Image: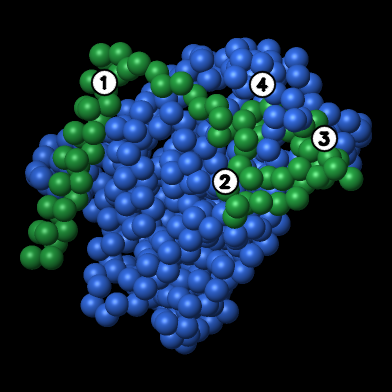
Amino acid sequence: MEKQYDSARGADRTTEVSREEITSVMTALEPDQIVFTKEHHHCPRRRLTWTEKVLFWGLRIYLVFMVGVVVYQIWTGVR
Amino acid sequence: MKDPKTISEARGEAATRSTLLNGRPISENDVVITHEDIDRAHDREQVSAVRARRGFRPRFRLFWLLIGPGILVMLGENDGPSMLSYAATGARFGIGFFLPFVVLTFLIACVVQEMTVRLGAATHRGHAELIFDRFGPFWGWFSMIDLMIGNFLTLVTEFIAIRAGLGFFGVRPAVAVSGALLVLSVALMTHRYWTWERIILAAAMFNLVFVPVALMTHPDWGAVGGALVTWRPLPGLTQETVLILLADIGATVTPWMLFFQQSAIADKGLTTRDIHMGRIDTVLGAALATIAALATMLATTPLFLHHMSAANFEAAEFAQALQPFIGHWGSALFALGIFEAGMVAAITISTSSAYAFGEVARRPHSLNLPFRQGRAFYLVLLVEAVAAGGLVLIPGIPLVYIVLLVNVIAVLAMPPALLFLYMLVNDREIMGALVSPRWANVLALGVVIILIGAGLLFGVSVIAPNALSIIGGR
């Protein structure tokens, strides 16, 4: 039986894989479910619009402010 | 086997792009197969074989094969601090407004988690990975830091629950924490997502132990039905009410749930054809978690009816206080439930951190990996759990404050996390035809508004407590 080697992550991941197993993986999994494919294809980065940036920053400021409120509550509680 | 047309139609160009390597289709000779792929393919072959058959039994078998992430995430979120919140709610307010309110929070959780089902099945990628890829490392790290801080604090509270639950039976804290870490490690030794999922699912079912405890208190079912329909009696708008309100929201909707369910769906290998079953899984999980949550509130209602103050109760103290009403066995069941809630959540939350780390650090991240191949994944999971467990054993640590912090921070961190989710699930480039329909977007925006509103109300209650009486019209 012909063997292939899994070496996607170097020597520590080396495992013998049979032809049957390769065929099984190729038929049972969708192409983008295979680890090798996922490692070689990343979703392209998208450009954020001005509105999206404002929303991101707005919610970030909201979170930082509210965490400050929680810290204040604990501080007053301890006192 | 699978139907490529359906997949391609559903995801449009995304599917085509993924089948190409350097501009040409991937062939068997190009691909390097991993242990993880082989295990996942084995699971998918079973799903395909069952799906090809007709009749009730194959359909039930398909249901059995595909359920898991939804139930795990919902029952996992019924964790130590959550059960403590529900217990405190029942003890402080009895039967009334908070019963339907908790049902509403689980409906909110369903809306949110359904989006992760679609996202995971359509992209086969975890949530952290998608955020990094689509929004870049700057926003990716923000979201990771939110998740890691929230997860670590939550994990600490799970060990507090484990310690408290077993403490009822006289187990020493060090033994309780060490035992829990051992159970967590043994579950990982399966090195198989499917086996791990079934073990944790079985353990999660013990969350329903609160149902017999509630029945032992002989609830007034007429009052329960009335409260669920009328949302009355309403509590007064005080600082305590707002805190409980926020804690109950944080008990059902938290950022780790988004990361966990999407990563688990990718790890389990669900595809676009499984989305319907993924939704059923999520709704079923929410229904079971709602029953357990309501049961916990009903179980502690006798404390409210007998005017017993439970303001500073910890988990085991609820069990002790309930003993005159439900006897020793009832109290023991309650304490066991608290232990179980902490144990299951400790496992799922540490797994959610490990998934996110692996996705971001581009390290292998799957429960199908042998330890040697997934060393970083397993180490992150174990190190986080050991650190959280160790912290609980330090004498003098203000554990009550940590519990209080956790649910509140979860609610506050949710709107930014939901914005990422909302944008990803409406991203036609990765979702194709599976982008959210308008009604789902309206519901999601409604959830964000509710969460921000609750957060702001909390802020007002802390900074200007007197303003609450003005808002409440008193």
Q: Which dot marks residue A53?
A: 1
Tell me the chain of label 2. A
- The chain letter under disc 4 is B
Q: Give SS at disc 2.
A: loop
Element at badge 4?
loop
Residue B375 in picture, x, y percent from top left: 53, 58
Q: Which residue is mark 2?
A: A9
Q: Amino acid at mark 2?
A: Arg
Q: Is residue B258 visible?
A: no
**Residue kind at label 1, given as amino acid type:** Lys
Q: Where does residue B123 sit, x and y in percent of width and height? A: 58, 28
The colour assigned to chain B within the rendered structure = blue
User: According to the image, label 3 marks what residue?
Assistant: A23
- The residues tagged by marks 1 and 4 sit, at their Cα atoms, a distance apart of 33 Å
How packed is label 2: few (under 14 Cα within 10 Å), some, or many (20 or more)? few
Confirm or deny contact between disc 3 and disc 2 (CB under 8 A). no
Chain letter of the residue carrying label 1:
A
